[in-house]
Amino acid sequence: MSFIQNNGSLSPKQFRMPSDVLQPHGRILRITFCKDEQARMLRIVFRSRAERTYRYPRLKCVRRPEGQSPHEVNAFRLADCDPAVEWYVEQNCEIIYRNDAGEESFHYPDLLLFRNKRYVFWEEKPKKFALQRVVQSRTELLQRELRAFDFEYEMKYAEDLGLEPRLTNAGHLLRFGRRPLALIDRWQLQQEINRDSKLTWGRACTGSLGPFGREVLCRAVLEGILSIDLSVPITRETRFIPGSLEVWK
């Protein structure tokens, strides 16, 4: 995975969308993607003036993402913190399918991610809505039918997206991790890993890892160089261990 570092963002060097239009297969009648990476199928901020909408500072998103609810913003944060996600884009696809009643229906997934070299759709809803019969039926249909196009489809419960302390930890990583790693940062980090040093949050906070220790550790997690357990709160004893990617990539 390779990135251009621009003002702290992690943007893919080669952003490649699927074909503009995918033809019928099974109960999928058509899948259409925005030709312009800056366009949306639905204009969120201007479409919902009566309700609060959200703009989010991008890290891996192809453009500055917009959300209709806090749980959509939580999804942006978690996608940004997942090293397996190379990029994501919101509201850029229209799926036309035939529902259980045989009628033509339209669906606009919340996110399209490129994760582990595969395209994945995310739809985010509170659990009580996601488990409604019509929504659950659509989810099962799309999970089954989209395999023919080599897509995955996942329903994300709003309650799971907001789980703590994972969400707060993600916020810490994004807060400190926007500073790109300089060559000297990577060299020093490689030395620490080679010595099997204990890379802890406490060391970063006291300056023993340099003046930008916190930024280096958090950025390294976002890039997959280091890893931490997001299910427990970050404390001074939190240890950062080698991740799935090399320091030099």
Image (cartoon, helix red, strand yellow):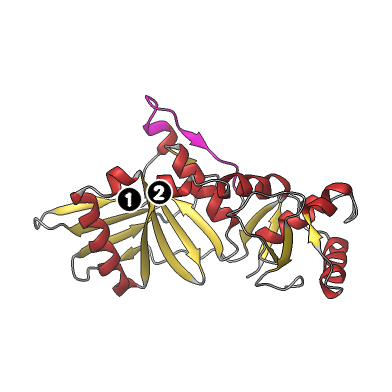
Image coordinates of residue 81 in percent, x first then y, are 60, 55
Instruction: Give the quadrant of the N terminus.
Output: bottom right
Q: Amino acid at mark 1?
A: Tyr
Query: In this view of the protein, can residue 131 be seen by the observer?
Result: yes
Magenta residues, start to end:
46-58
Q: Amino acid at mark 2?
A: Gln
Left/right of residue 228 with respect to residue 65 in the rendered view: right
First in sequence: mark 1 vs mark 2: 2
Q: Does the magenta portion include 55?
A: yes
Which residue is located at x 62 percent, y 59 percent?
A: 229
| 29 relative to 201, above or below | below
Tag 1's secondary structure? loop
Which residue is located at x 55 percent, y 44 percent?
A: 64
Which residue is located at x 20 percent, y 56 percent?
A: 137
Q: CB under 8 Å between callouts 1 and 2?
A: yes
C-alpha span from label 1 to label 2: 6 Å
| 56 relative to 134, above or below | above
Residue 47 picture quarter: top left
Q: Residue furthest left?
A: 101
Residue 91 is marked as 2
Residue 108 is marked as 1
Nearest the eye: 107 or 190: 190
Left/right of residue 116 with respect to residue 246 in the rendered view: left
Residue 227 picture quarter: bottom right
Image coordinates of residue 3 in percent, x first then y, are 66, 63
Nearest the eye: 172 or 202: 202
Q: Would you call the spot at circle 2 few (<14 residues within 10 Å), some (14-19), or many (20 or more)?
A: many
Instruction: Give the quadrant of the C terminus.
Output: bottom right
Query: In this view of the protein, can residue 62 be seen by the observer?
Result: no
